Image: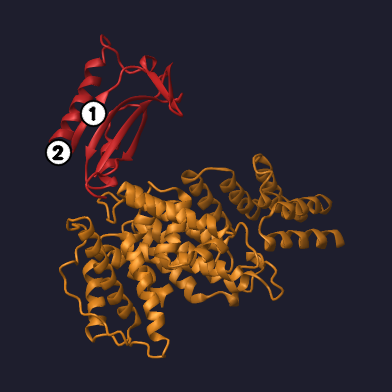
Amino acid sequence: MVREEGGRLLALLADRLGSLEVAEDSLQEACARATRAWRSGEVPRDPAAWVYVVARNVGVDRSRREAAAHRRLSTSSRVLDTAVERPGEDGEEPASASALLVAEYAEVGDEQLRLLLLCCHPALSRDAQVALTLRLAGGLTTEEIAAAYLQPEATVAQRIVRAKRKIRAAGIPLVIPEDLGERAEVLVTVLGLIFNEGYLAHSASAAGLTRAELADQAIRLTATAADALPDEPELAGLLALELFHRSREAARVDAEGRLVRLADQDRSLWDTVQVARGFTVLAQALARRRLGPWQVQALIAAEHTRERPDWSRIVRYHDLLATFSPGPVARLGRAVAVAEVDGPEAGLREVDAIDSLDRFHLWHAARADLLERLGRGGEAVGEWERAAALAANPAEAAYARGRAEHQEGA
Amino acid sequence: MKYLLILASDPAIPSPAPGDDDFDAYMGAWGSYTQELVEAGVYQGGEALQGHETATTVRHAEGSTSIVDGPFAELKEHLGGYYVLDVDTLDDALAWAKKVPIGTGAVEVRPIFPTDGY
């Protein structure tokens, strides 16, 4: 319940109580009380509403105490004068609790977007934006975030504490600004980073489960943001890309846990519901007629869902992508597509023309694959080995090692 | 909430000096920016500082002091002036910081410690 509903409740409480800090403490206290009260087995009909009412009461009490301590009334808290019925201590919520929660959600409406925008405020560092988004909007624990990013828990905890301190001390507001352009850009970047970390994982480990969860969190948060901001088509573009990638999850590794290339995947394992949703979302984004790099990447992923992708179209999409985010990695994607259109020799020429990716495992993997197709197996072995050595993700390293061994045996 | 806007610019890119063709326009931009702050009711103070080469620093170390020539920190960008604004949130302060007619440079936005109980 807390995972699913936590971010929403926190956002609503922060809005009602006028302070993120008070909202967080109150929600935590309410969850602790819930755990105690429900231990007997008597769980209320609407647990979220129960927790909300308790948290709101705790928050109001605390704001009142603090206001008294400062010998002046806090002007930031909007609910101080609202009398709220208290749920019984035996865990039975008043009949009005569910109705109250629904009404408050309806009144605030954009609470989740507000919280997301706060977490992704440009005055915070990128690392802090990612950690706060997962912690506050996503409802992950500090421990889970640390595990997903293979970082010490203390590091993540400190990052979150510092960010929250800055929000309070510097007066970063919980509002939806009129001019969203720059803010939406940060939002889509942070959500994209979270998804990449979960799905394309630079440093995956045995904690694979946590990472799939991270990708699902990213999808949930991106869907929330895209829903709230239909005029920012890049959010929908990112959502479509996430859905296309996620749809292939079951086909991405074989029974032995080995990575399977897109072209070799068992398409019957793809989640067709996710694919269909991806197409719908992408179509809505494109209808806004404001193309951006995430939409173009989604177009490429969409083309790959076809049984026989149109590779010349993929080359054109890569050209388009390069106009938004030029760079050697984008050129590598284009080179691989060129190999499918004009043959491995042309592809290899393009790959070789990129001279700054010597430390990037996928550059070596692309070279190796093309050398193999050109019958230059001896050179390919060395390139697969280099790809294996450079890959941070164990699954990708194992894949490259397997290809090297296979080639040596041939 | 009060914020200090610290204005810093690169000395390698000189501002127009008296007598230059664009000096009047340059000073006019600062004048109208300050006027805008006053009219919005957020202006609490602000000054332009004389050059970096005019600075003297008094260093304190365990009770003793020493006087040295120059600013306290040698930075690529030099402190050139400041504003103190009273606005509601950091977003408002950042919006004003974006409008500072500094040309090329940087504006650091620092919340000032509140004195009203918090």
Question: Where does the N terminus of chain A fall, quadrant-wise?
Answer: bottom left
Which of A348 and A71 lies nearest the eye of the viewer?
Answer: A71
Above/below status of A108 relative to B24: below
What is the number of the mark on residue A283? Answer: none
Q: Chain of mark 2?
A: B
Three-letter code for the amino acid on which mark 1 is drawn: Gly
Label 1 sits on residue: B46
For the point 57% across and 63% down, the residue is: A147
Q: Position of residue A191 (x, y in %)?
A: 45, 58
Is any part of residue A294 visible from this angle? no
Q: Is tag 2's residue or tag 1's residue first in the polypeptide sequence?
A: 2
The quarter of the displayed image where residue A83 is located: bottom left
Q: Which chain is red?
A: B
Q: Position of residue A312 (x, y in %)?
A: 56, 54
For the point 51% across and 66% down, the residue is: A215
Q: Chain of mark 1?
A: B
Which of A356 and A267 lies nearest the eye of the viewer?
Answer: A356
Report the number of numbered marks.
2
Q: How is the image coloured?
A: by chain
Which of B4 and A48 lies nearest the eye of the viewer?
Answer: B4
Q: Cβ–Cβ below 8 Å for labels 2 and 1?
A: no
Three-letter code for the amino acid on which mark 2 is drawn: Gly
The quarter of the displayed image where residue A88 is located: bottom left
Label 2 sits on residue: B41
The kind of secondary structure element at disc 1 is: strand
Chain A palette colour = orange
Q: Position of residue A180 (x, y in %)?
A: 30, 51
